[in-house]
Image (spheres, grey):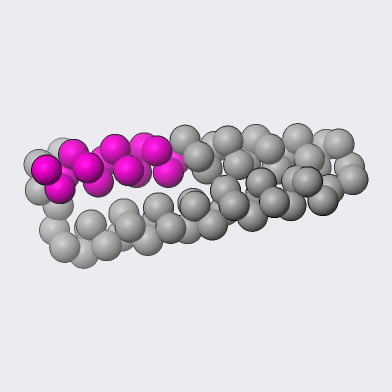
Amino acid sequence: MAEQLAVHETMELHELMMFKTTCMTKSSTMQKLAEDEELRTLMQQDAEQSSRAVNALQTLLSRTQS
């Protein structure tokens, strides 16, 4: 990958990061309200995956903006 991203690519990464942050927040909040154990487990897994995605996007953005 090139060291510098185009402006539109950087904006896309920011949009993805905001989307995954929203997904993580929603899953974390909703899992506390879920009564079904399987649903609660799926929401927890989704929150964890979203957290990893946000971290990966932050790493990518920090490398390209340096």
Q: Position of residue 21 (x, y in %)?
A: 49, 52
- Residue at 60% x, 41% y: name it: 47
Q: Quadrant of residue 8?
A: bottom left
Q: Is residue 38 left or right of residue 42?
A: right
Taking the view exactly as shown, the residue that stands out farthest to the right is: 35
- Residue at 23% x, 57% y: name it: 10
Q: Is residue 58 left or right of residue 40?
A: left
Q: Which residues are magenta?
A: 53-66
- Residue at 78% x, 40% y: name it: 40
Residue 55 lies, with reference to residue 23, above or below; the image says above
Q: Main secondary structure of the magenta part?
A: helix
Q: Is residue 63 magenta?
A: yes
Question: How many numbered tags mark residues here?
Answer: 0
Q: Position of residue 50 (x, y in %)?
A: 52, 43
**Figure quadrant of the N terminus:** top left
**Figure quadrant of the C terminus:** top left
Q: Quadrant of residue 39?
A: top right
Residue 63 lies, with reference to residue 27, above or below; the image says above
Q: Position of residue 19 (x, y in %)?
A: 47, 58
Q: Is residue 40 left or right of residue 53?
A: right
Q: Position of residue 23 (x, y in %)?
A: 57, 53
- Residue at 34% x, 43% y: name it: 57
Q: Is residue 19 magenta?
A: no
Q: Quadrant of residue 44?
A: top right
